[in-house]
Image (spheres, rainbow, N blue to C red):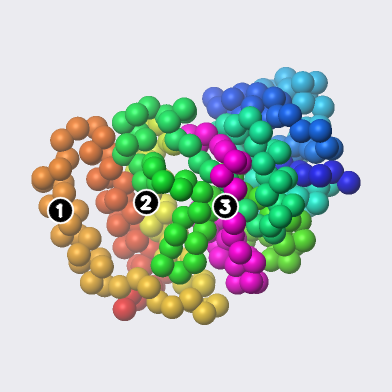
């Protein structure tokens, strides 16, 4: 049996996957392990680039995941053919640091469910890093009013835990990792931080892409709250918060937006706010 299986979902990643594959090829780990690239129907030359690494990475397998759209489906499909007792997830557009596989195995030897550390400066321009939330601090576990969670770009889990929770919810196209983390913790399993499992995270490169990303976060956050309230989550979204945020956003736009960095930061917060509102309408969610 493999010690660990690394699952990498990808879709039209031809501009960035070279970096991740090179980093995975350089991992030094003495026990048997494997990489499973799960292509979610790429229409660019992502697969051609991956094929160039087949000889360099003999422990890599590539499978097609075209029956359903979404990284949740791709990750579940990858795990279904994985041979490792431990499972690690990373993304095609990031870069694992040296020693990442070793750190994941060490952490999972001691814990059932872990997340690593995210670093933002290597793959992003400085204005982008300064604009985005989570630019400093822990970078791994993200605290929430309900339960903590971590991003699926740097997540590790024992196979038995993944199977016990039923994998990722394939109906959730955005924030399936948050849902996954919450459901695992509801089984009584703690999310632990493994700081030595470091990845270099890549943000979306344009303000338009950042706006879309954070709008999606806000929009799908409503669906997530609605789902988990049926599982015991208290109602946390309030109308007075919407009013307060609207006032604060208006004042911030007038007083603080002065350059590309401050505009991007404001637009991301506005996008999340707008997505939240649209999500309430779409899912008929009534804040308290």
Q: Quadrant of residue 52?
A: top right
Q: Residue at x 31, y 78 (%)?
A: 288
Compared to 125, does 65 lie above or below?
below
Is 273 displayed left or right of 168 in the figure? Answer: left
Q: Earlier in the sequence, mark 2 or mark 3?
A: 3
Residue at 20% in and 60% down: 246
Residue 69 visible in image = no
Closer to us: 284 or 87: 87
> Percent x, y for residue 109?
74, 52
Counting other residues with Cα less than 10 Å from the Cα at mark 3, is it few (<14), some (14-19), or many (20 or more)? many
Whole-angstrom CA distance, mark 1 to mark 3, is 37 Å
Q: Secondary structure at mark 3?
A: strand
**Residue 54 found in image quarter:** top right
Q: Are marks 1 and 3 in contact (CB under 8 Å)?
A: no
Residue beneath label 3, please? 193
Q: Regarding mark 1 in the picture, which secondary structure is present there?
A: helix
Relative to 46, residue 197 above or below: below
Look at 65% across and 57% down and name the residue there. 113
Q: Which residue is denoted by mark 2 in the rendering? A: 215
Q: Nearer the viewer, mark 1 or mark 2?
A: 1
Dots 1, 2 in contact, CB < 8 A: no
- Residue 250 placed where, x, y %? 15, 53
Q: Which residues are magenta?
A: 173-202
Q: CA distance from mark 2 to mark 3?
A: 28 Å
Q: Position of residue 163 (x, y in %)?
A: 75, 62
């Amino acid at each position: 049996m493999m010690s660990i299986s690394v699952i990498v979902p990808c879709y039209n990643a031809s501009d960035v996957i070279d970096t991740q594959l090179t980093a995975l090829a350089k991992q030094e780990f003495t026990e048997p392990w494997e990489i499973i690239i799960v292509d979610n129907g790429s229409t660019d030359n992502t697969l051609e680039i991956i094929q160039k690494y087949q000889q360099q990475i003999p422990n890599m397998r590539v499978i097609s995941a075209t029956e359903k759209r979404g990284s949740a489906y791709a990750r579940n499909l990858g795990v279904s053919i994985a041979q490792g007792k431990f499972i690690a997830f990373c993304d095609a557009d990031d870069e694992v640091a040296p020693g990442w596989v070793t750190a994941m195995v060490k952490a999972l030897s001691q814990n059932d469910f872990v997340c690593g550390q995210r670093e933002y400066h290597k793959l992003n321009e400085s204005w982008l890093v300064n604009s985005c939330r989570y630019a400093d601090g822990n970078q791994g576990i993200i605290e929430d009013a309900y339960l903590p969670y971590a991003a699926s770009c740097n997540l590790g889990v024992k196979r038995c835990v993944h199977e016990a929770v039923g994998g990722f919810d394939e109906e959730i196209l955005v924030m399936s990792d948050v849902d996954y983390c919450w459901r695992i913790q509801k089984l009584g399993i703690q999310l632990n931080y493994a700081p030595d499992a470091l990845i270099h995270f890549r943000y979306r490169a344009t303000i338009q892409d950042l706006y879309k990303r954070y709008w999606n976060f806000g929009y799908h956050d409503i669906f997530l709250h609605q789902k988990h309230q049926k599982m015991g989550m208290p109602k946390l979204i309030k109308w007075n918060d919407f009013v307060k945020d609207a006032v604060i956003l208006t004042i911030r736009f007038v007083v603080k937006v002065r350059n590309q960095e401050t505009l991007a930061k404001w637009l991301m917060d506005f996008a999340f706010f707008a997505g939240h509102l649209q999500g309430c309408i779409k899912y008929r969610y009534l804040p308290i």
